[in-house]
Amino acid sequence: MLRCLIVDDNDYFLSAARCLLERQGVSVVGVASDGAQAVRLAERLRPDVALVDINLGAECGFDLAVRLQGEAGPAALVVILISSHSEDDYADLIEASPAVGFLNKTSLSGDAIGTLLAGADDCHRRGPVNGPPGR
């Protein structure tokens, strides 16, 4: 079962996303509303993937993605960036980030996460590329 950490500053979204993903077979092992809490939970819970909102109030989800990758140690944490805004609004920043991809919050599902993770695995087997498949 996929173990997931969700990072968003909106309590309503955290609750809704957790319920949705758990109904779809994703184990949400933790939720965080800021970067410091996310790093602590990631270190303690060792999730397989972190869904990180691009806009975390006063914090930047892109910066948090870098922190989560850097502090994950040998078992690198896979990061997927999420937002209610269009991917086109952040395309260059998403591509430059360590995230394996992006999901619009309205497209969030266990299947969508699985598709991004499968694409990331394919990229790693074939060698480095400039971004996840489909971009």
Image (tube, rainbow, N blue to C red):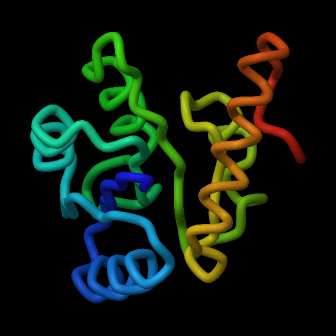
- Does residue 97 appear to the left or right of 28 in the view shown? right
Q: Nearer the viewer, residue 28 or 133?
A: 28
Q: Residue furthest right?
A: 134
The quadrant of the rendering that contains the C terminus is top right
Q: Residue furthest front?
A: 1
Image location of residue 42, percent across then percent down: 21, 39
- Does residue 33 appear to the left or right of 47 in the view shown? left
Quarter of the image for residue 123 reads top right
Q: Nearer the viewer, residue 59 or 7?
A: 7
Image location of residue 81, percent across then percent down: 53, 52
Q: Nearer the viewer, residue 116 or 82?
A: 116
Q: Nearer the viewer, residue 87 or 101?
A: 101
The quadrant of the rendering that contains the N terminus is bottom left
Image location of residue 128, percent across then percent down: 77, 13
Q: Residue at x 50, y 78 (%)?
A: 24
In this picture, is 77 found above or below 13? above
Q: Residue at x 37, y 47 (%)?
A: 60
In this picture, is 59 found above or below 93? below
In this picture, is 11 found above or below 59? below
Image location of residue 70, percent across then percent down: 33, 18
- Does residue 33 appear to the left or right of 7 in the view shown? left
Q: Residue at x 16, y 32 (%)?
A: 43
Q: How many marks?
A: 0
Q: Residue at x 11, y 49 (%)?
A: 37
Quarter of the image for residue 133 reads top right
In this picture, is 39 found above or below 57? above
